[in-house]
Image (cartoon, grey):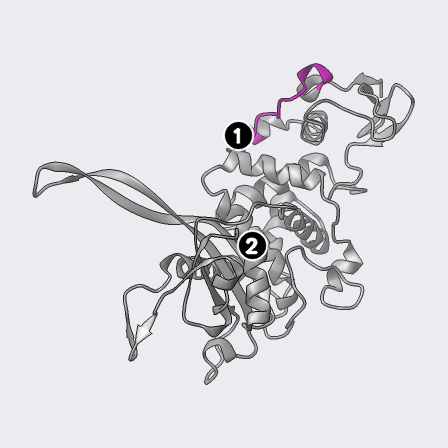
Amino acid sequence: MAAEAVGGVHGVTGAGHLPAAPTTLPEFQRLFADEGASREYIAAVRWPNGFTCPKCDRAQGWWTARNTIKCTNGHQTSVTAGTVMHRSKLPLATWLYGAFLVSTLTPGISALQFQRQLGIHRYETAFQMLHKLRAALVAPGREKLNREVEVDEGFVGGVEEGRPGRGADRKALVIIAVEVVHWTQPQFNKETGLTEIVERNRAGRVRLSVIRDASAETLLPWVQANIENGAKVFTDGWAGYNNLEKLGYRHERVLQSCKGKKTGRYLPMVHLIISNLKRWLLGTYKGAVSAKHLPAYLNEFTFRFNRRFWRGPAFLRALGLMVHADARPEYKTLYATGEEGGWAHPNSEPGRQDGLVESTG
């Protein structure tokens, strides 16, 4: 294969510009018609300011072997080295298609569907690839939630008769925080014949994590790690949140019921998110998500929900995180998750690993 200058989409002269992101399948097929286009695209995302050799900082190189760049000093660098695609034998276009499916499909995709869509021979390969993509969806140093935030916990898992509420066993306890976004919208009033300005609310960014319990020792550090100090935090009356004001938050408790009757205000955004999460897990995975892998599914849900209005940027963001991922699960460590020496999913905490149906879907 003749040497070819590293140029095209991301060449040195085109520094500072990210490539266009596909938002539809026809656009995807047009952008990634062959392996050459795929490797150029990945290089453009990895070196948006132009190729720089990681060994000597030379800013010029040529494609040599399959996906290898050779700089003018003779150092060779694989475009996939140090990424979630490291040492993978799958075509680059397959990885790009996988990232496109994970980042843009609203209902997500199971490992079995993923295997079929990508034409992967072994289910285990598809399962590992999907979890490598999920592992790359948590941005390091991501911005905390701010302004107004609702916080609550919910259980994920089968119904256990006779053990409701925070004391239930055989379930995974998930904490949810969601920003409340306010905006105004003009609305025509038929009775008065006038256009009025109406205030609307919607869910903004979310954060979800599996937690070991609902004690103050667990809840308060999580709030500090995920919500900006000074934000207004809405919770129910659970005692685990009692010291939020001492930590610098504006804390407002929302009474959910009085003498067995709903009060009408009960953290609507956070309850909407937990409802959507449960429907997603049930609809896409038939509820067959093991407790030890649940943090990975929460990361996927969070990534896609926070970018639900921007499909193209979501794909670019997912790909950008893929090529700069510091850690990724390998075959043995992934299947040993929850055991000593096994893979620890990003944004996960040590805790209960029992209760959910064990399945690699």
Q: Give the quadrant of the N terminus.
A: top right
Residue type at the position of mark 2: Asn
> Which segment is the magenta one?
11-28
Task: Kindly check if marks 2 and 1 are in contact, taking CB atoms under 8 A apart as contact.
Answer: no
Q: Height in image: 182 above or below 250?
A: above
Q: Which residue is nearer to you in this view: 254 or 325? A: 254
- Disc number for residue 36: none
Q: Height in image: 306 above or below 317?
A: below
Give x and y (percent) for residue 191.
7, 43
User: Which residue lies under the disc numbered 1?
Assistant: 26
- Graded by Cα atoms within 10 Å as few (under 14), some (14 to 19) or many (20 or more), the crowding at tag 2 reads some
Quarter of the rendering containing residue 270: bottom left
Residue type at the position of mark 1: Pro
Please check the rendered image and state whether residue 13 is part of the magenta-colored stretch, yes or no. Answer: yes
Q: Nearer the viewer, mark 2 or mark 1?
A: 2
Q: Tell me which residue sits at (74%, 53%) in the image.
A: 329
Q: Tell me which residue sits at (64%, 73%) in the image.
A: 352
Give x and y (percent) for residue 39.
72, 29
Q: Which residue is nearer to you in this view: 181 or 112? A: 181
User: Which residue lies under the disc numbered 2?
Assistant: 226
- Graded by Cα atoms within 10 Å as few (under 14), some (14 to 19) or many (20 or more), the crowding at tag 1 reads few
Q: Tell me which residue sits at (55%, 38%) in the image.
A: 314
Instruction: Give the residue at the far bottom of this rendering.
Output: 162
Q: Height in image: 29 above or below 197?
A: above
Instruction: Give the residue at the far right of this rendering.
Output: 74
Q: Tell me which residue sits at (52%, 53%) in the image.
A: 229
Q: Which residue is nearer to you in this view: 67 or 316? A: 316
Alpha carbons under labels 2 and 1: distance apart? 38 Å
